[in-house]
Image (tube, rainbow, N blue to C red):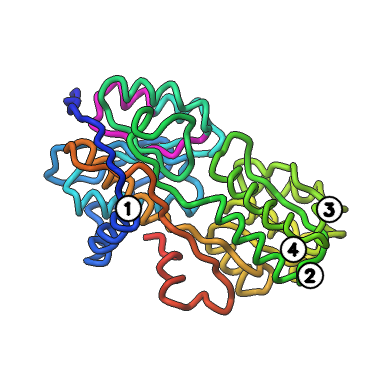
Amino acid sequence: MRVPVRRWRSHIPKMMVFAVAVMAATAWMAGCRKSGSPGETGVGATTTTSPATLNIAVIPKGTTHVYWRAVHAGADTAAHDFNVNIVWKGPVLENDRAQQIAIVEQFVSEGIDGIVVAPLDNVALKRPIDDAMAKHIPVVIFDSSLQGDVGKDFVSFVATDNKHGGEMAGDELARLLNNKGKIVLLRYGEGSASTLDREAGFLDAIAKHSDMQMLVQNRYAGPTSGDAQNTALEMADQLRQADGVFASNESAATGMLLALRKLGLNGKVKFVGFDSSDKLIEGLNDGDIDALVLQNPKMMAYLAIQQCVNALHSQPVTAHIDSGAGLLTRENMNTPEMQKLLEVK
């Protein structure tokens, strides 16, 4: 059955992002509740059911990493609060651009009301998203950017300030090393705008210190922790020389952790990662990881759904929203602020 396409108009005034975040956070703190189970992962779609009339597709980069479970939970909470249905569907692995493009195309052809998508590639997803916008289906980009102009090529962009997140990681690693030492950067993947920004921010932070030297800065981990581990092991000689390491996402950090343990370098090399999982938190507790930059994926998804709903109702839409980030260490990991960022349900 074809879902009717709702007409909408872009209305993006100059609003303060902080005000939007406060309003969303107020609704959030009223009770993080879900209107349905996340269901199974993978490319199969799951729907949050409610008596709503609007149907919004939520398309993550992948469904393997713990991070996306938290995104799903935030989308479910927003579906309840804003009385909409969400349809969750994404590729299994975060390198399957063709699958993500096909999913967007499927929803456009079915006439979904709105789309919230985290692009795997900041260029490859442009054409299908252009098609959606041309058919008056509002698209909100979240997590990772897309080439184009907000308000024209998509209605809103909701994400972590990833460049700042990378700078946080670089500043922390410099502090841990007293502003001197040899550094290895394990990147995530080419075309992933979010991690490219993190890596750029990290390099900028390290460049502020003349006594810090980059040993490796152009190796890519790949889409899984297994790929990342193999890539890290191929850099064994450089890792043995390194004083500090940064890995720019969950799977890259997990692979690096496993490689350092296998090489007997865990706890000997200062290690800052990005995102969290049970394995990474275990590494932090064990002293094998020194810090993790955490995003707020639940709030990110919540705000992205909110902006899509606003567009569908011809309400004001905020062009850019920073969903926030924090630095997790062994010293602060039990604080309420950090525990909130660690929630995945």
Q: Residue at x 27, y 20 (%)?
A: 135
Q: Nearer the viewer, mark 2 or mark 1?
A: 1
Q: Which residue is mark 1?
A: 16
Residue 225 point in image, percent of width and height: 63, 49
Q: CA distance from mark 2 to mark 3?
A: 14 Å
Residue 246 point in image, percent of width and height: 69, 57
Q: CA distance from mark 1 to mark 3?
A: 47 Å
Please, what secondary structure does the residue beneath circle 1 have? Answer: loop
In primary-sequence order, the first of circles 1 and 3 is 1
Q: Residue at x 36, y 56 (%)?
A: 299
In primary-sequence order, the first of circles 2 and 1 is 1
Quarter-wise, where is residue 190 in the image? top right
Q: Which residue is mark 2?
A: 268
Q: Amino acid at mark 2?
A: Lys
Q: Which residues are magenta?
A: 104-120
Identify which residue, 197 or 246, lies in the foreground.
197
Q: Amino acid at mark 1?
A: Met
In primary-sequence order, the first of circles 2 and 3 is 3
Q: Residues within 10 Å of mark 3 (few under 14, many from 20)?
A: some
Residue 37 in the magenta stretch? The answer is: no
Q: Amino acid at mark 4?
A: Arg
324 in relation to 190, above or below: below
Q: CA distance from mark 4 to mark 3?
A: 12 Å
Q: Which residue is mark 4?
A: 261
Q: CA distance from mark 1 to mark 4?
A: 46 Å
